[in-house]
Image (cartoon, helix red, strand yellow):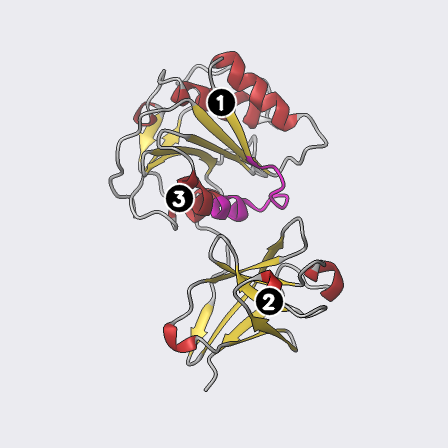
Amino acid sequence: MNRSATSFNPCGLITLTTDFGLQDPFAGIMKGVIKRHFGDASVVDLCHAVPPFRGEIAGLWLGLCHHWFPEGTVHVAVVDPGVGTDRNIVCIQARCHAFIAPDNGLAAELVSHLDSWTAWRLDPEALDLDIASTTFHGRDIFAPVAAMLASANAAPDSLGSPDPELVPSALPRPIRKDASLTGEILFADHFGNLSTNIPGPLPKEWNDATVSVEAQTARLVRAYGEARPGETVAIFNSFGLLEIALPRASARDRRQWGPGTPVRVSKTG
């Protein structure tokens, strides 16, 4: 549900999260448009390697990462397979931050990590934007709106109508049953470590829990360096998610696990 959020006072910083990758000019063009509209803007690349079309992963990253940035930051997320259709774009205000995202499950995943938020549905026509393309709203809508917010030329509540119903997130949730918790791998990072949808910490009485991936057991450790050579381990990473790792190697490549592979945590004793 929508609840009131604290005020937003822009600090001039904008972050970008997309599935564009870096081999094409899309991310760079967005930065150029932002600077053209607001020359004093500072732009930070949060991530351009979101798995293609996986808006819920972008929402997860924003939910887990935004609090590391100063209050007044504008966060832009463009993972938008519905670009050019009648899908909505929303602006969300929360914790003194502003977020601009397509309403395709990305926004709903983001707000699932927030305790207080308010959302508005953007009205691009009312904002008098030069929308030249039906395939690159990152350039034509998201970037100029981010510049408006970051420069204080627009406030979140001036961008459109309030409190839209958000499209639900497609991110799977772990299932707890008796003395076990079953989740799945979501994605692999640059090192081949496999992040799951199982958040920590585990209940105190589960200190000696067993983690299994398919038919293989992964010992739960506190640091990568605790792993023995060639040992697959489980660890709660810096984002608080249970991760399957093969230190100094790629668990993704060596074990051939990936998104959707089931992971189970079982209480022992």
Q: Secondary structure at mark 2?
A: helix
Q: CA distance from mark 1 to mark 3?
A: 29 Å
Q: Residues within 10 Å of mark 3 (few under 14, many from 20)?
A: many
Amino acid type of disc 1? Ser
Label 1, on which residue? 42
Depicted 251 relative to depicted 74: above or below: below
Amino acid at dot 2 = Glu
Q: Nearer the viewer, residue 236 or 6?
A: 236
Q: Is residue 65 visible?
A: yes
Q: Which mark is residue 226?
A: 2
Q: Residue at x 47, y 42 (%)?
A: 62
Residue 238 as seen in the image, left or right of residue 72: right
The amino acid at mark 3 is Leu
Comparing labels 3 and 2, the label whose residue is closer to the camera = 2
Cα distance in 3D space between marks 3 and 2: 43 Å
Point out the tag, 1 or 2, that comes first from the N-terminus.
1
**Residue at (36% x, 24% y) in the render:** 10
With 24 as the anchor, is 123 left or right in this view? left
Of badges 1 and 2, the one in the foreground is 2
| Residue positioned most to the bottom | 269
Bin the neighbour count of mark 2 within 10 Å (Cα to Cα): few under 14, some 14-19, many 20 and up: few
Residue 121 horizontal side relative to residue 209, left or right: left
Of callouts 1 and 3, the N-terminal one:
1
Picture coordinates of residue 44, whole percent (x, y) = 53, 30
The local crowd at label 1, few if under 14, some if 14 to 19, many if 20 or more residues have their Cα within 10 Å, is some
Residue occupying the point 74% across, 59% down: 253
Asked whether residue 88 appears in the rendered view, the answer is: no
Q: Is residue 47 magenta?
A: yes
| Residue that carries the numbered disc 3 in the rendered image | 166
Looking at the rendering, which quadrant does residue 75 occupy?
Answer: top left
The structure residue drawn at horizontal position 44% and vertical position 48%, both measured from the top left corner, is: 109
